[in-house]
């Protein structure tokens, strides 16, 4: 994978990383820029800082698409910039940030030193539904459309470039990640994004840049998955598990999270 910036709209760049197949975004205005997501450690963030500086020397604003560690553990290296995120993003980072660090170390012991040097920094500018940022004379609109991949996913719209950064509401190259998800709400959240944001270029949180047809197809799959989960809650999973479009381990994550919602 070539970890270079790719311009997907006027002065709007995407950098796809080998680590977690994560996409970061860069939106450049006149004398200012916006960095979307900061990677999963200080080491990775330092690499991202250097990459941004190869494009622009302008000061930056940071946006975290949601509260999963691979999208925000690099925040400290971008301070003292404003860091924007959903209100629940900041709350969950405050509450669970150390648990996330411990989880990474448990599953990736070779990264212990890298993880231990991380200073956990939550967003210091938050909103609940919508915010608009002036990035050097061009507007970037931040929206929270509802529950989905997490409780606090936000979408960044760059209307003058025809680009939407969808975060992990859209996933390319792998099944959507359900471990912290709300499977029964995710379809409506994605539908609202597609209805209200007509831009043709959609940047997923992970994987290749996609178009609206891809995002619509993934929405339709999520609708199918939600309906199957509701049936499984009534009928039992045994006869339905083979109908899910995912492997058994992913399907069981869907079921666990959907049943949690249905039982609440």
Image (cartoon, rainbow, N blue to C red):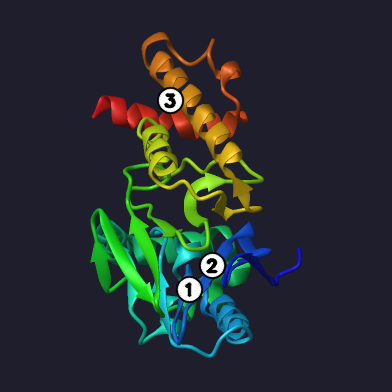
78 vs 238, nearest the viewer: 78
Distance between mark 2 and mark 3 Cα atoms? 30 Å
Name the image quarter holding the C terminus. Answer: top left
Report helix, strand or loop for mark 3: helix
Q: Report x, y in % for residue 112.
A: 55, 72
Residue designated by label 1: 35
Dot 2 surroundings within 10 Å: few (below 14), some, or many (20 or more)? many
Q: In the picture shown, does residue 148 fall above or below 39?
A: above
Q: Are marks 3 and 1 in contact (CB under 8 Å)?
A: no
Q: Report x, y in % for residue 194.
A: 44, 41
For this view, does 145 lie left or right of residue 26? left
Q: Quadrant of residue 141?
A: bottom left
For this view, does 206 lie left or right of residue 223? right
Residue designated by label 3: 226
First-in-chain label (1 vs 2): 2
Distance between mark 1 and mark 2 Cα atoms? 6 Å
Residue designated by label 2: 25
Q: Report x, y in % for residue 1.
A: 76, 63
Residue beneath the point at 43% across and 45% down? 149
First-in-chain label (3 vs 1): 1
214 vs 47, nearest the viewer: 214
Report helix, strand or loop for mark 2: strand
Q: Report x, y in % for residue 222.
A: 49, 30
Q: Quadrant of residue 227?
A: top left
For this view, does 240 lie left or right of residue 182? right
First-in-chain label (2 vs 3): 2
């Amino acid at each position: 994978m070539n970890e270079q910036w790719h311009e997907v709209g006027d002065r709007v760049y995407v950098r796809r990383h080998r680590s977690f197949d994560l996409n970061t975004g860069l939106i450049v205005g006149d004398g200012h820029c916006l960095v979307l997501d900061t990677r999963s450690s200080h080491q990775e963030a330092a690499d991202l800082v250097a990459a941004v500086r190869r494009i622009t020397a302008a000061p930056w604003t940071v946006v975290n698409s949601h509260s999963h560690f691979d999208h925000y553990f690099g925040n400290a290296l971008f301070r003292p910039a404003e860091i924007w995120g959903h209100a629940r993003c900041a709350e969950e980072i405050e509450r669970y940030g150390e648990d996330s660090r411990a989880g990474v170390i448990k599953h990736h012991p070779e990264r212990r030193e890298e993880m231990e040097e991380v200073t956990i920094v939550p967003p210091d500018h938050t909103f609940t539904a919508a915010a608009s940022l002036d990035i050097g004379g061009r507007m970037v609109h931040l929206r929270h459309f509802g529950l989905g991949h997490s409780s606090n996913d936000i979408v960044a719209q760059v209307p003058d470039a025809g680009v939407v950064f969808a975060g992990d509401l859209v996933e390319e190259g792998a099944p959507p990640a359900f471990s912290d998800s709300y499977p029964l709400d995710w379809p409506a959240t994605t539908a609202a994004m597609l209805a209200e944001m007509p831009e043709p270029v959609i940047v997923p949180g992970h994987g290749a840049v996609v178009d609206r047809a891809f995002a619509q197809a993934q929405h339709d799959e999520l609708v199918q998955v939600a309906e199957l989960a509701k049936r499984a809650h009534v009928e039992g999973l045994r006869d339905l598990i083979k109908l899910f479009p995912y492997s058994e381990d992913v399907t069981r994550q869907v079921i666990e999270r959907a049943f949690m919602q249905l039982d609440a």
